[in-house]
Image (spheres, rainbow, N blue to C red):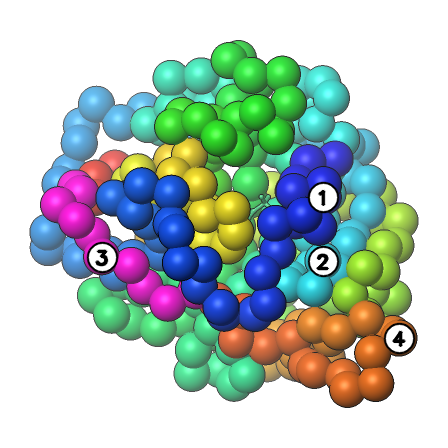
Amino acid sequence: ACSSRYVLSQMHPMWQEPLAIPGGERQSPIDISVRKSMFDPQLKPLVMKYDPRTCQQIWNNGYSFLVEYDDTTDKSTLQGGPLEDQFRLCQFHFHWGENNKWGAEHTVDHLLYPAELHLVHWNADRYSLFEEAVMEDNGLAVIGVFLKVGKRHEGLQKLVDALPAVRHKDSVVEFTRFDASGLLPENTQDYWTYAGSLTTPPLTEAVTWIIMKQPIEVSHDQLAVFRSLLFTSAEEDVQKSMVNNFRVQQPLKGRTVRSSFV
Ligand SMILES: NS(=O)(=O)c1ccc(S(=O)(=O)NCc2cccs2)s1
Ligand SMILES: [Zn+2]
């Protein structure tokens, strides 16, 4: 599984933005200005091939909950779109708020969504480990999907039912045969893409972001279960609800956001 070693060593207390940000020229998240984005007809269709058999576990890392995949083979991959290489899915996680008014990291013309899904992939054509790729400009590709409150999401429910088992920081539970593509919107061909960074430590500027235009719908009750998770481990005497685990928006610094649609 990816990232676990990273997060344990790199995690800072919630929201304390580290002083020295690597480079600082291409930080994430950002506001996506629809009218300032550039349609790029050369962007190819995105190709996601996720094998549910590579799904392994859910882990509360004290920041979000991660559904981690076996990324030692090319069974769950992402290619196409703005990407030159083939990337392997290593984990997905979410960011959400204390209520349904805010919680996502990216915004679209400053529109706030209540949550955002991130599917994290690393460039397995050029690197042999996630930990290597996380330090390189073209090392990672993260698909962002906005969540809006509406009808119940049947594909999400298996995940929601498993969350009480990882209520506390550092808890892990086996979680298998989960089809991550079930969390993608029907339309995956309309997206924005830009060069950015991880939105938590190590904040490295290694991410090609691919943000889906179409949100997925989840129910109020499903989102409420996210908020029942805790930032704190079972041993700590003060328990803190895991909410508002999103980063503040970062300056665009002259970057162009491209769109795959007119
Ligand atoms: N939000 S994001 O997709 O830009 C990532 C930040 C850090 C990532 S990690 O895979 O290096 N660590 C695991 C995680 C830490 C926090 C949430 S997931 S992924
Ligand atoms: Zn994230």
Q: Within 10 angstroms of label 3, few (less than 14), some, or many (20 or more) residues?
A: some
What is the secondary structure assignment of the residue under circle 3? loop
Residue type marked 4: Glu
Cα separation, mark 3 vs mark 1, equals: 28 Å
Is ligand 1 within 8 Å of the beta carbon of the residue shown at mark 2? yes
Disc 2 to disc 3, C-alpha distance:
27 Å
- Whether label 1 lies within 8 Å of ligand 1 gets the answer yes
Give amino acid for label 3. Pro
Report the span colored magenta.
247-256
Q: In terms of image quadrants, where is residue 34? A: bottom left
Q: Specify whether residue 184 is painted magenta.
A: no
* CA distance separating discs 4 and 3: 38 Å
In the image, residue 118 sits, relative to residue 232, either above or below, namely above
Q: What is the magenta segment's predominant secondary structure?
A: loop
Q: Earlier in the sequence, mark 2 or mark 3?
A: 2
Is the residue indicated by label 3 positioned so its CB lies within 8 Å of ligand 1?
A: no
Dots 2 and 1: beta carbons under 8 Å? yes
- Can you identify the residue that label 4 sits on? 235
- Residue type indicated by callout 1: Ser
Contact? badges 4 and 2 (CB < 8 Å): no
Q: Dot 2 corresponds to which residue? A: 61
- What's the amino acid at mark 2? Asn
Q: In the shown orientation, is residue 233 left or right of residue 246?
A: right
Figure label count: 4
Q: Which residue is mark 1?
A: 4
